[in-house]
Image: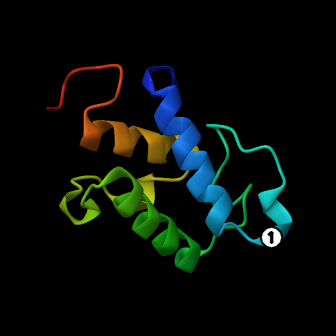
Amino acid sequence: MTCGASSSSLERVVRLVRQVVPWQFAKREIGADADLQGDLGMDSLGKVALALRIEQDFRIDLSTLQTDLTSIRTVADVVGVVDAMTGAGGGHDRM
């Protein structure tokens, strides 16, 4: 859910997304509802590059992720995963 997403996490994720999207999409406005593939042209290699950057930037290990990766489609989905794994989200269901 995007309303619980940390704005700090959103800004960091958007910065990382801009680093890996094809150049023709990098100048577009990227919001929480942007679809990684449909709106931003990110292919599977781009998603791997994004995952590596997220692991480095947020110091998390995505290999421990309990979520089906195919369900991560939007920037908000990425932020939700980051917030859940770092404890930065609006809810306190994860520690």
Say which quarter of the image contains residue 59.
bottom left
- Density class for disc 1 (Cα within 10 Å; few <14, some 14-19, many ≥20) is few
Mark 1 = which residue? 23
Answer above or below: position of 93 versus 67: above
Q: Residue at x 72, y 59 (%)?
A: 40
Q: Nearer the viewer, residue 68 or 15?
A: 15
Residue 53: where, in percent of width, then height? Answer: 45, 64
Q: In the rendered image, is residue 7 in sight?
A: yes
Q: Quadrant of residue 56?
A: bottom left
| Position of 17 relative to 84 (above/below) | below
- Total labels drawn: 1
Where is residue 2 drawn, in percent x and y? 51, 27
Question: On the rendered image, what quadrant is the C terminus found in?
Answer: top left
Colour logic: rainbow
Left or right of 89 on screen, residue 45: right
- Left/right placement of residue 1 relative to residue 82 reads right
